[in-house]
Amino acid sequence: MLVGVVGKANVGKSTFFKAATLAEVEIANYPFATIKPNHGIGYVKVECAEKFFKTTCNPRFGYCINGTRFVPIDMIDVAGLVPGAHEGKGMGNQFMNDLNQADVLIHVVDISGSTNEKGEPIEPGQYDPLNDIRFLEEELDYWYLDILKKGWEKFARSIQQTHKDIRKELAKQLSSLNVTEDLMKQLVVDMDLDVEHVTFWTEDQLMEIARRLRKITKPMIIAANKIDVKTGKENYERAVKEFPNYKIIPCSGESELALREAAKHELIRYLPGDANFEIVDNGKLNDRQKNGLDMLKKNILDVYGGTGVQQILNYAVFELLGYMHIFPGGVHKLEDSEGRRLPDCFLLPAKSTALDFAFKVHTDLGKKFIRAIDVKTRMTVGKDHPLKPGDVVEIIANK
């Protein structure tokens, strides 16, 4: 699973990305500060199984604080987008190629309208940020359409002459976009497409196919960044009304980065996603830092219940992708061979079974699967047992 951070140039993408990962990335107030994609590790926030067992875990990856587990996820911050990217403008071609790797998109929008369509800084309110949501949709739709139409006439004639299954052949042609045969079958039904006369499909129908495939294979959440800047809240409220099909979350990547850096240097105690923080030692902070933290709390945390960054990551992974967190463990022993308690937490797609989990832990466990045990209830379950978020599962397999 790969989470892509996308958007127009100079809207705070790299700040959002660094806040989520604390990776060393270039942050600058000019277009295309990000030329090559930045890769990093972010974290989703879940309840740790240690609370159920009244114990303390020892994560191999990620970390846990007072029963709140932070599970690592792969993230990529791609080059900024400009109108006409699908035609190669700006960093268009590179953007599209990098974007194709992502399973879910976080679209960072400068909701204050202080960045114009070219990614240049302007006064807040001089640009309508809702245009960014529209044009990213359009660029992605045309990108999908370009891939779909590549050699379309020859392809369509061949399908019609050989009587091949258009749904299967299109799934093969679009496999790089994670398009499956089942998805194409459902789309053909939903659009009532004539599979016997593919050459008659119109330009409008091809565009609608591209649009629907984009929505399904590249689910997206809107990060309404710079929410604390003048006109930000007003624009956010307009966006929520105009785009009811999107989850739009107000956020401040800059505020989250400040809090995480302060926590990293042990100036404050702060858990990502929380609505508050605690100053460790007032004497370690100068007046400017104290004023900055006070303003951040007043303008962001108290108003929105958090900076929005952690909420956005969690929504992307658990709501849009439908993943769930599962722990390996044993009824009689929660430790691994090195004595680490509840060391691992895996993220699995929705509807995953005990057998799916066995393969996730290790291929041999899947191949030699006998049964599984729900460690919390101590019930024995079969390979088709559906898992639910937070389960702790023991796999019994042949030696």
Image (tube, rainbow, N blue to C red):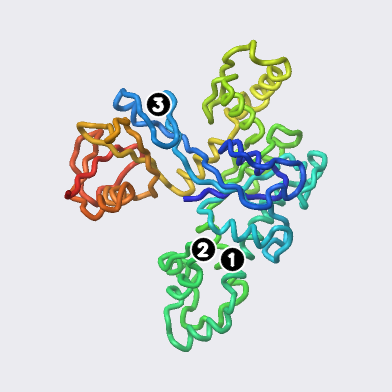
Q: Which residue is mark 3?
A: 67
Question: Which residue lies at the image location 75% right of the left edge and 47% below the top edge?
Answer: 128
Q: How many marks?
A: 3
Q: List the single residue furthest toward the front.
A: 338
Q: CA distance from mark 3 to mark 1?
A: 43 Å
- Amino acid carrying label 2: it is Leu
Density class for disc 1 (Cα within 10 Å; few <14, some 14-19, many ≥20) is many
| Res 362 label | none
Q: Which residue is mark 2?
A: 177
Q: Nearer the viewer, residue 37 or 208?
A: 37
Asked whether the viewer can see residue 246, the reply is no
Q: Of label 3 and label 2, which has the lower sequence position? A: 3
Earlier-in-chain disc, 3 versus 1: 3
Mark 2 to mark 1: distance in Å?
A: 8 Å
Q: Are marks 3 and 1 in contact (CB under 8 Å)?
A: no
Any part of residue 391 in sight: yes
Q: Residue at x 47, y 89 (%)?
A: 161
- Give, as a three-letter code, the residue at label 1: Tyr
Q: Secondary structure at mark 1?
A: helix
Residue 211, by quadrant, is bottom right
Kindly identify the residue that appears in the image at 73 percent across and 33 percent down.
229
Measured as percent of width and height from the top left, residue 213 is found at 53, 63
Q: CA distance from mark 3 to mark 2?
A: 38 Å
Mark 3 is surrounded, within 10 Å at the Cα level, by few (under 14), some (14 to 19) or many (20 or more) other residues, namely: some
In terms of sequence position, does the residue under pointer 2 or pointer 1 come before the other? 1
Task: Say what amino acid the circle numbered 3 marks.
Answer: Gly
Confirm or deny contact between disc 2 and disc 1 (CB under 8 A): yes
Please give left or right for residue 101 compared with residue 235 in the image: left
Q: Is residue 260 above or below residue 120?
A: above
